[in-house]
Amino acid sequence: MTSAGDAASEAASGPPLRVGLLGTGPWACRTHAPALAAHTGFEFVGVWGRRPEAAAELAREYGVKVYEDTDALFADCDAVAFALPPDVQAPLAVRAAAAGCHLLLDKPVATTPADARAVAEAVAEHGVASVVFLTLRFAEPSAGWVAEQAERTGWFTGAAHWLGAVFAPDGEPGDYADSPWRRAKGGLWDVGPHALSVLIPILGDVTEVSATRGPADVVQLALRHSSGAASTAVLSLSAPSAAAGVGLEVRGTAGVFGLPEWRDVPGAYGRALDALLASARTGVPDVRGAEFGARLTEILAEADGQLPV
């Protein structure tokens, strides 16, 4: 894996890469666009969106070109960043890779293993770099904490909970409540990738998974890992406001270790851009790339298939 220091060094050398943004929702406006415009390793050149008026407004704000055609955007870019629903993202990512664009993907990469695998295969076939923006793997101090725990052995168990209040039954809807795919797929698919992105590098790949439903969209996962450790994850976007929160701990022969708090999401996105730039310039795949994204989708799909309709 490329270290943060190495990535920063790579980001500081060479001409900037031309980057385009696909998506115009709150996530694109609050996180992607500001980070793309601020990063010295990239030249923010354009925006495409499914809502042309929103794309035009975002493009005007940053003084970049608005694109009506994704292939035209790909032709003008060295890299593209995605802020789209997963099943819209996946086929466009395949086309972008075929056009020679490096990919900064959102999670989940897709909601079917076949679509996610197609993205990973396109990345490998066309020799482009890819990074999946998994917040905990780029935010600090959480990213450093994951790397530190991944060096330990003797793990026994782990437990994660990510209980969002996006669709809270009491109080105002969350910032991302106007998101049909989140409402349809729930916490398993939206926040499950975050939990798995921490548990897997520490405890090892998932070798067994079982899933059960709770109230609303609550899903509980029981996981067995390649290290032999067991873990659980409780996931939801519909927690009561007073019950919402995020936590994760791992336990083993070295003791009990809890995930530290993180807050700087824009800074995390900037470090994801550093990682993409480093991978693009060195040719060394990032471990948080499309292949890892495909593996997360496989695990989530297996769990989803066990849930009652």
Image: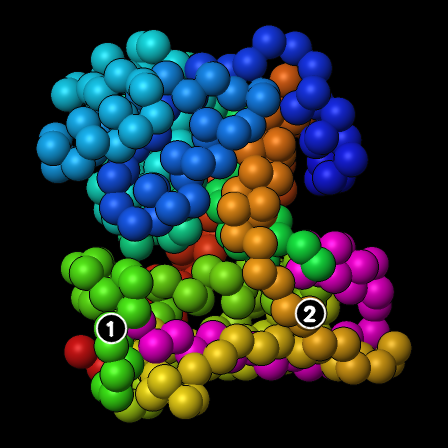
Near mark 2 (Cα within 10 A), the count class, few <14, some 14-19 or many ≥20, is: some
Residue 58 visible, this angle = yes
Amino acid type of disc 1? Pro
Q: Residues within 10 Å of mark 1 (few under 14, many from 20)?
A: some
Residue 137 in sight in this render: no
Q: Which mark is residue 212?
A: none
Tell me which label, 1 or 2, sits earlier in the chain.
1
Magenta-drawn segment: 142-166
Comparing 240 with 217, the one in front is 240
Give the numbered dot on residue 173: 1
User: Which residue: 52% across, 46% down?
Assistant: 266
Of the pair 63 and 119, the residue shown nearer to us: 63
Please give the residue where the numbered disc 2 appears in the rendered image: 260
What's under tag 2, amino acid-wise?
Pro
State the SS at label 1: loop
**Percent x, y for residue 150?**
76, 59
> On the rendered structure, is 250 left or right of 275?
right
Q: Are marks 1 and 2 in contact (CB under 8 Å)?
A: no
Instruction: Give the secondary structure at mark 2.
Output: loop
**Which quadrant holds residue 307?**
bottom left
